[in-house]
């Protein structure tokens, strides 16, 4: 019988993945991998000749449009001036990441 995966292949895969597989786990893993890969052989038997190829599970189409500037009643400078906390030309916002040893909710 032509094996889907053998011990030598499993050892090479483990080496490439940089994982260690103990001797007592090798046979169980080989058995599981053979079962999984065997399901792919079953899928090869399915007739898909009348199916069109897909790149994903759903057929979405991007809609492109030209970027066009729009008039705004509020100028950027007005927005910056109305911001509650500023430091020089930067807007100050609450912390997103906790300080070392603290949490965001501590205000640190």
Image (cartoon, grey):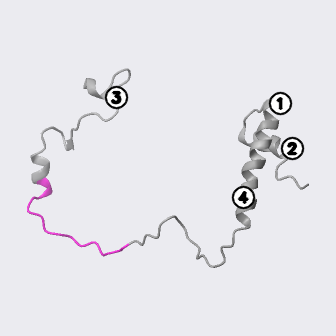
Kindly identify which residue carries mark 1: 23
- Asked if the residues shown at circle 4 and circle 2 are in contact, with their CB atoms under 8 angstroms apart, the answer is no
Kindly identify which residue carries mark 3: 98
Name the quarter where the N terminus is drawn. bottom right
Tell me what residue is drawn at x 76 percent, y 54 percent: 38
102 relative position to 55: left or right = left
> Can I make out residue 108 in this image?
no
Q: Secondary structure at mark 2?
A: helix
- C-alpha distance separating marks 2 and 3: 48 Å
| Residue nearest the viewer, comparing 10 with 15 | 10
52 relative position to 61: left or right = right
Q: Quadrant of residue 50?
A: bottom right
Percent coordinates x, y for residue 66 in the rendering: 30, 75
Q: Quadrant of residue 51?
A: bottom right
- C-alpha distance separating marks 1 and 3: 45 Å
Q: Quadrant of residue 2?
A: bottom right
> Earlier along the polypeptide chain: callout 4 or callout 2?
2
Disc ID at residue 8: 2
Q: Nearer the viewer, mark 4 or mark 1?
A: 4
Q: Secondary structure at mark 4?
A: helix
> Earlier along the polypeptide chain: callout 1 or callout 3?
1
- C-alpha distance separating marks 4 and 3: 47 Å
Q: Which residues are magenta?
A: 63-77
- C-alpha distance separating marks 1 and 2: 13 Å
Kindly identify which residue carries mark 4: 40
């Amino acid at each position: 019988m032509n094996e889907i995966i053998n011990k030598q292949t499993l050892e090479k895969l483990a080496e490439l993945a940089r994982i260690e597989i103990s001797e007592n786990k090798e046979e169980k893993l080989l058995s599981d991998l053979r079962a999984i890969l065997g399901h792919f052989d079953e899928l090869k038997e399915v007739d898909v000749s009348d199916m069109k190829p897909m790149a994903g599970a759903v057929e979405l189409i991007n809609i492109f449009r030209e970027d066009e500037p729009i008039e705004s009643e509020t100028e950027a400078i007005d927005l910056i001036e109305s911001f509650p906390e500023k430091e020089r030309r930067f807007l100050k916002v609450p912390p997103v990441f906790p300080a070392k040893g603290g949490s965001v909710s501590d205000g640190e």
